[in-house]
Amino acid sequence: MALAIGDTAPDFEAETTEGKIRFHEWLGNSWGILFSHPKDFTPVCTTELGTMAKLKPEFDKRNAKIIGLSVDPVDNHKKWSQDIKDVVGFAPNYPMIGDTDLKISKLYGMLPAATPGSSEGRTPADNQTVRNVFIVGPDKKIKLILVYPMTCGRNFDEILRVLDSMQMNVKHRVATPANWKQGEDVILTSAVTDDEAKKLYPQGWKAPKPYLRIVPQPRG
């Protein structure tokens, strides 16, 4: 069964560049960004890992932990780290999972469950489906799944945007319209009644349709 939004993120134990972890325990009460890579020393992923390291302070502000995954051994990740710093200016400052037995890639549906063998001898093309982003909430539920082709670098500003939207929904019961950016108007969800909305937004709201109530972005 493929994983879907709302499913519990499968727990696992793994060796990482920062030691052995158990995923749910490592996550604790934080949000989590698990992003995966088909192979070490690949060009697009080199730029991605460095970009994520550069953005880590932004994820820290949002109580979100970052963890990377590649099917290669942890020792390779450590060697790759210097290349990443040379290219982007930032080395990974978050754990990188070594998924040499392909267990986690298969657990998360990135490789078929029947995939034989280990990472040894596999090429980036063999692992091209291991190009995903999973956002996991503090409740350990999957909140977002993105799957990218090997030739397209991921937009991590978009991951931050989605995270902001989801966290605002949890706190204020609002949704965000298409192409929303920080500071722009948002939409009241159906969980907020009109009576509640009058108390929360005494200045009122715009309603181009009865089911579409637009208010300024809540602060705090």
Image (cartoon, rainbow, N blue to C red):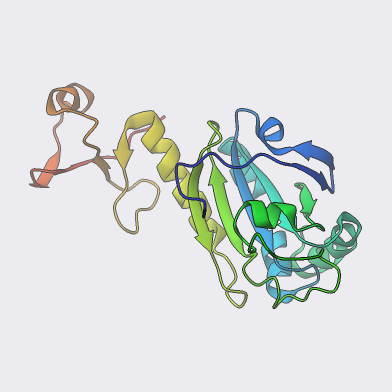
Q: Residue at x 71, y 75 (%)?
A: 126
Q: Could you tell me which residue is drawn at 21 percent across and 35 percent down?
A: 190
Of 89 and 144, the residue lying toward us = 144
**Where does the image place residue 104, in percent across and percent down from the top left?**
70, 52
Residue 52 in view of the camera: no
Q: Is residue 92 above or below residue 29?
A: below
Asked if residue 163 lies left or right of residue 206, the reply is: right
How many numbered marks appear? 0
Q: Is residue 218 left or right of residue 21?
A: left
- Residue 63: where, in percent of width, then height? 59, 35
Viewer-nearest residue: 173 or 11: 11
Residue 218 located left or right of residue 6? left
Q: Quadrant of the C terminus?
A: top left
Q: Quadrant of residue 82?
A: bottom right
Establish if 196 lies above or below 189: above
Q: Residue at x 87, y 55 (%)?
A: 74
> Can residue 21 be seen in this snapshot?
yes
Q: Residue 36, image x and y in percent?
A: 67, 59
- Residue 17 is situated, as x and y percent measured from the top left of the image, at 84, 48
Q: Residue 21 appears in which quarter of the rendering?
A: top right
